[in-house]
Image (cartoon, helix red, strand yellow):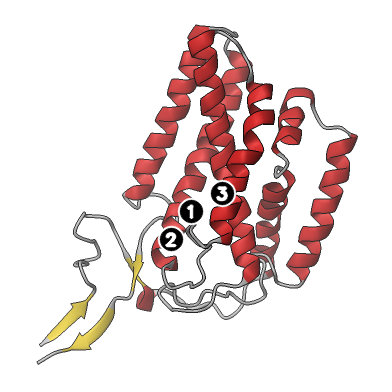
Amino acid sequence: MTALQTGEVAGGTDDRGIPVEFAGDRRIRARNKVYYRVVHWPIWIWVFFILPGPLTFDLFESGFDGRMAAWLGVVLLGTGIAGLRGRLPGVEARPYIIRFTEDRPNPLYRRVCYTFAWSAVVTFAVLHIAGLAWAIATGDWLMRQIYEAGYFPIAATIWILGAMGRLPRVKASTKGEGHERRFFYGSLWAVCLAQPTLWLLWAVLPPGRPGDIVKLAVFMALLAFVGYLSYRGRLPRTRPIVPGELAISD
């Protein structure tokens, strides 16, 4: 008797009805194309450029200035060198992850990059929620003070978790990559939609408690909605990847 050994997986979905991909069915790419490597570079430029959170706050509040130009130059140089050496995820000459369920050591550069990416994803969202909640509760707009007081404690907590290997895609082994990447991309899609929407609302809504309530409600709703779509595997790169190997049993 022949059976598809996929744990709880049957018919391309798991026991929750979430679509899955079989690792054995995925096309193996021997090399990354040049355009693929080039388009991944700006992602890491942005991740490291917004690393100093209070400076990023000044960018959106007051515009680009000499401090940001100097920091951008450092980031361009650092990520450019790392990219040329194949030490940025997605910018490697050859993909490091071949089989998403394979137990391989997770290189240091991947662990560092994804730690800072998680920091960018989580920290800014938490600060914006806190700032809006405070403004609604007290009527005081203290976003700058909240950034100055809260950014580095929150970010440092995430950096420590990354150093300990406690974050998805930052663990010592790549064995769980088939599931861990869906948590990362789900979070990424959520903030990439919610944050620009929040910036737009800041531009078009008048200041005051009613506007802040709308901003917070829309922001939280988008995070929850996109998070749910990601959980259900409806967004790019959010489907679980499982072994899906054929086995013979008698």
Residue linked to disc 3: 158
Does residue 203 appear left or right of residue 99 in this picture? right
Q: In the depicted view, which residue is nearer to us: 151 or 93? A: 151
Q: Quadrant of the C terminus?
A: bottom left
Q: Which mark is residue 180?
A: 2
Indicate the secondary structure of the residue bearing disc 3.
helix
Indicate the secondary structure of the residue bearing disc 1.
helix
Q: Amino acid at mark 3?
A: Ile
**Alpha carbon distance from label 1 to label 2:** 7 Å
- The answer to which quarter of the image holds residue 175 is bottom left
Residue at the image position 56 percent from the left and 20 percent from the top: 201
Q: Amino acid at mark 2?
A: Glu
Q: Is residue 90 visible?
A: no
Which of label 1 and label 3 is nearer to you?
Answer: 3
Other-residue count near label 1 (Cα within 10 Å), few / some / many at <14 / 14–19 / ≥20: many
Extreme-bottom residue of the structure: 250
Q: Are marks 3 and 2 in contact (CB under 8 Å)?
A: no
Residue linked to disc 1: 184
Residue at the image position 29 percent from the left and 76 percent from the top: 244
Instruction: Indicate the position of residue 190 as horizontal and vertical percent values.
Output: 47, 40
